[in-house]
Amino acid sequence: MTDTMAIEDYLAQGGVLTAPDNAPARYRGELMRMMSTFVDSELAGSAGFAASINLAPGIKERIAASRITLEKADHAERVLEVMGSFGTDTGRYQSQHDWAARVARDADLGTARGAGDMRLSVFHYPLQGWTDAVVMNVAMGLATGVQLAELSRVSYAPLAEVFRAIAPREARHAELGLEGLQRIVATDAGRAEAQAALTYWQPRVAATFGVAGSARYDTLARFGLRHTPNESLLGRWQAALAETLGPLGLK
């Protein structure tokens, strides 16, 4: 117990861990939860965009959707390898859920994760057409950028390194989506369709940041697994969304 408390004090003061053997049980549990959420979300996101490839209106868009599908699966694999160092059966893990499964379009999960896997709630909703997929990709891509800036500072060094390597490629996914969205809003009909999609996806992406004043945040912050409260991250995303979509005539 003395050793465990010493490690927790070390983490609270900004220390980092570099191997599973050093991780206290509670820290290990929270770290595994964090990694599972990321892996499951990336696998579900990849499965969702895979279904959109054939909806792409042109070769450029098809390539972008294919790239996003591939790289999200690759990002999941990289974090899953870190989970493997903690004893996770990585082969079984990646095949235990239907990553393409979705709830009804009009379902309201709020911040709940749904049954089964640990994907963020937004990845339980189905994409509905090309414009819908592009808008979701831009909105969630900007959110992922904010979230990865936070995750890249986690106190488990091997995982932080993976997140820092992943971050530029996830940022490129949002850029690819924005390029597609710019072509969509070039017409009045396209802008109206994009606005309807944004109205649907914005609250669902916002829910991925969790609740304000989260009781778990204090524990995660003490372990060096979080540094910025949910409501602050949400505010950063809202500002980025307005800055990015405002010039396109989207609210």
Image (spheres, grey):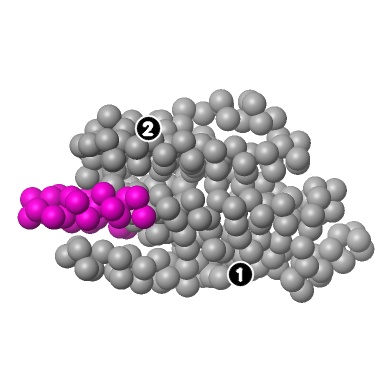
Q: Name which residue lies at 78% across and 67% down.
A: 15
Given residues 38 and 112, the one toward you in this image is 38
Residue 247, placed above or below residue 69: below
Where residue 232 sits in the image (x, y, percent)? 47, 72
Label located before the other in sequence (2 or 1)? 2
Residue hosting label 2: 50
Q: Residues within 10 Å of mark 1 (few under 14, many from 20)?
A: some
What secondary structure is marked by label 1?
Answer: loop
Q: Residues within 10 Å of mark 2 (few under 14, many from 20)?
A: some
Disc sitting over residue 125 in the figure: none
Residue 146, placed above or below residue 87: below
Q: Name which residue lies at 41% across and 41% down.
A: 68
Q: Is residue 166 left or right of residue 45?
A: right
Residue 28, placed above or below residue 89: below
How many dots with numbers?
A: 2
Please state which amino acid type lies under the numbered disc 1.
Answer: His
Q: Quadrant of residue 235?
A: bottom left
Farthest residue in the front direction? 60
Given residues 110 and 76, the one toward you in this image is 76
Magenta segment boundaries in residue numbering: 175-203
Q: Is residue 125 left or right of residue 184?
A: right
Q: Quadrant of residue 191?
A: bottom left
Q: Is residue 158 left or right of residue 142?
A: right
Farthest residue in the left direction? 188
Disc sitting over residue 227 in the figure: 1
Q: Name which residue lies at 34% across and 37% down.
A: 63
Farthest residue in the right direction? 2
In this orientation, does residue 216 appear? no
Magenta segment, prevailing SS (helix, strand or loop): helix
Q: CA distance from mark 2 to mark 1?
A: 34 Å
Dot in front, 2 or 1? 2
Where residue 164 sits in the image (x, y, percent)? 60, 57
